[in-house]
Amino acid sequence: MNAPRQLESDRPLLFLDVDGVLSLFGFSTGTGAPGRFHFVDGIAHCIGDQCGGRLARLLDRYDAVWATGWEEKANEYLPTLLELPDLDLPVLAFDGRAVFGSANWKVEAIDEYAGDRPAAWIDDNHDDDCRRWARERSAPTLLVSTESASGLSDEHVERLLEWAEEVSGEGRRSSPHSANAPPRGA
Ligand SMILES: [Mg+2]
C-alpha cells in the first residue's frame, strides 16, 4: 500500500547501486543467465529477471536515490530495462570519482544527501569505509550487501521492508537521533 502523500518525508532513504544489485555479473553461465542482456552505451548488462518487481516493493516504503556510477544514465535506461516506466529518482553525482568494483567514493555524496534522515544503502561493494560511515551516523542506518552474481533478492527486500517499518515506528515515538540501529549487512 502506498504511504499517504503527506507522510513521504518520514520515509527512510534508500541509496541504490546498480551494478551488482540490479545489473548482474560474475554468475556462472553454465546454468543460464539470471536475467536478460541489454546494451547500454555498447556494454552488455544482464538485468536480473526479478529486480524490477523487487525494486517496486521497496519504492512503496522508501524514498530511493540512485547511488551508482551510472549517474544520469540510471534514469535514462533503467525505467525501460526494469519495466518500471514511471521510475524517476534523484541521482547522486560523483564528479568522475566512480571506480568500478568499489564503493567508498560514494560515501561523501550519500552522507551529504542523507543529512539526519534514516538511510539504507544497498550495494555489492561495501567496504570498511562504508561500514565506518554507517556505524558513526547518528540516524538509523542499514547497509545491505549483495552478491554481484545474484543482486537484489527477496531476502534483501524483506529485510529492507522490515527495517523501514522499524525506523518508521521509532520516528513516531521519538526524535530521529535517538533511534540508532546498528548497521547490518555483509
Ligand atoms: Mg556495484
Image: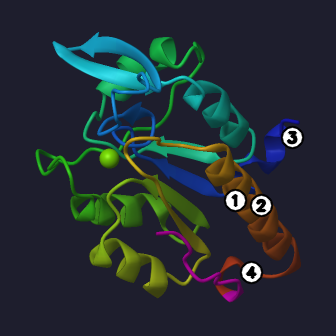
Q: Residue at x 72, y 37 (%)?
A: 57
Q: Which residue is mark 1?
A: 159
Residue 103, image x and y in percent? 27, 59
Q: Residue at x 35, y 65 (%)?
A: 126
The picture quadrant where one finds residue 172 is: bottom right
Q: Nearer the viewer, mark 1 or mark 4?
A: 1
Q: Nearer the viewer, mark 2 or mark 4?
A: 2
Q: Main secondary structure of the magenta part?
A: loop
* Alpha carbon separation for disc pair 2 and 1: 5 Å
- Determine whether 137 is above or below 32 in the image: below
Label 2: which secondary element: helix
- Determine whether 30 is above or below 107 in the image: above
7 horizontally vs 127: left or right: right
Mark 2 burial class by Cα count in 10 Å: few <14, some 14-19, many 20+:
few
- Per the rendered image, the range of residues in magenta is 178-186
Task: Indicate yes or no whether the magenta region holds residue 140.
Answer: no
- Determine whether 110 is above or below 116 in the image: above
Specify the amino acid type for callout 2.
Glu
